[in-house]
Amino acid sequence: MSQSPPALDIDDLRKEYDDVTALDGVSLTVPEGSFFGLLGPNGAGKTTFINILVGLVRKSGGHARVFGHDVEADYRKTRNAIGLAPQEFNVDRFFPIREVLEHKAGYHGIPAEEAQDRADEVLKQVGIYDKRDTRFDWLSGGMKRRFLLARALITDPDLLILDEPTAGVDVQLRRDLWELVTELNDQGKTILLTTHYIEEAERLCDEVAILDSGQVRAVATPEELKDRGTDQIVVELREPPATLPDLLAGDDRVEAVDLDGHQLTVTARNGGLVAPQLVRELDREGIEIVDLEITRTSLEEVFVEMTRHDDGDTAAGDASDVDSDADAAGDDTDIEDDDSPRAEQQVAPDGGQR
């Protein structure tokens, strides 16, 4: 029995704009049915990566496959498998939102009657069915985000790409969207999430890739990434010792041991494993513990450390110009509106490549 291909199979993917490299040999695999996060600072290459998947940008080299379909050779199958909720509001503003959804479905070959049913279904799913006859511009910011998700779902895609889906929304709406996309993932949809909210990735994602300056720095679960950082074991002592004994000597997980009055602080990797040994050594020394707390490193701290650049490193800044601007108006595409008939015709009016 043959094994089904992964949702994403990316091998040595590259993209150059003139003398700037936006993607520099990206390789990663996203299993079918997973909730996968793509994290990176501005200019890391996230937008370029997504635009290659959906056919808005041509790669310079490497391979990208969606459920086994090459993003260029099998463009139509690839695009039909993907639902994209972009960060930007690229929506036709002159029609009621239900009509926009029906048009979108029609571009993908869905019959008119079925398109109407699907439009109603996804509007109910995202909670804005009562706004079905409202033009996009008249929606609130939160409703606009919900609509982008509805538009991504109208074709019932196998892969849902969410590009900063909760940017600029309030806390309650963010949590509502979290609940909705979690349900979609539980139903079997593969989800690729890009976000600047590290808490969002930590809460939702099975696995995350950290992308920086066009390269993948790490692929791991949020817990595995946090294990790469350092924790702090803070111990409140009954009486501070006259001299600090040589604690945890030889333990290569320990980076620092500091005493400030009654407070002893140990900085170490895998703090939860180091703490019991510390307690035993303090007990042997007759030093009484009043309180002990372990503060784990956060995913955000690990992310910042892995993507930190020296002041003289301009690579990130150069890539930022490419990633935010060139994809929208660069050398590969003049598609401006994913919902417009003009845009869809340029992408694949007959299922072929542009």
Image (cartoon, grey):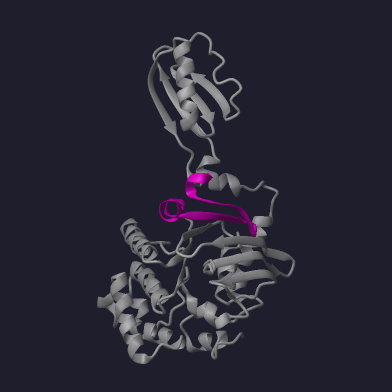
Q: Position of residue 226 (x, y in %)?
A: 50, 43
Vertical comparison of 254 with 187: above or below: above
Vertical comparison of 44 with 5: above or below: above
Residue drawn where x is 39% and y is 71% of the image: 149
Point out the stretch of residues depicted in magenta: 197-225
On screen, residue 172 versus residue 51, left or right, reads left
Q: Quadrant of residue 45?
A: bottom right
Whether the magenta-drawn stretch holds residue 80 is answered as: no
On screen, residue 212 versus residue 232, left or right, reads right
Residue drawn where x is 48% and y is 45% of the image: 223
Taking depth in this image into account, of 207 and 336 the one nearest to the observer is: 207
Q: Quadrant of residue 42?
A: bottom right
On screen, residue 136 versus residue 86, left or right, reads left
Q: Position of residue 109 (x, y in %)?
A: 45, 88
Quick one: quadrant of the C terminus? bottom right
Taking depth in this image into account, of 212 and 309 the one nearest to the observer is: 212
Residue drawn where x is 61% and y is 80% of the image: 333
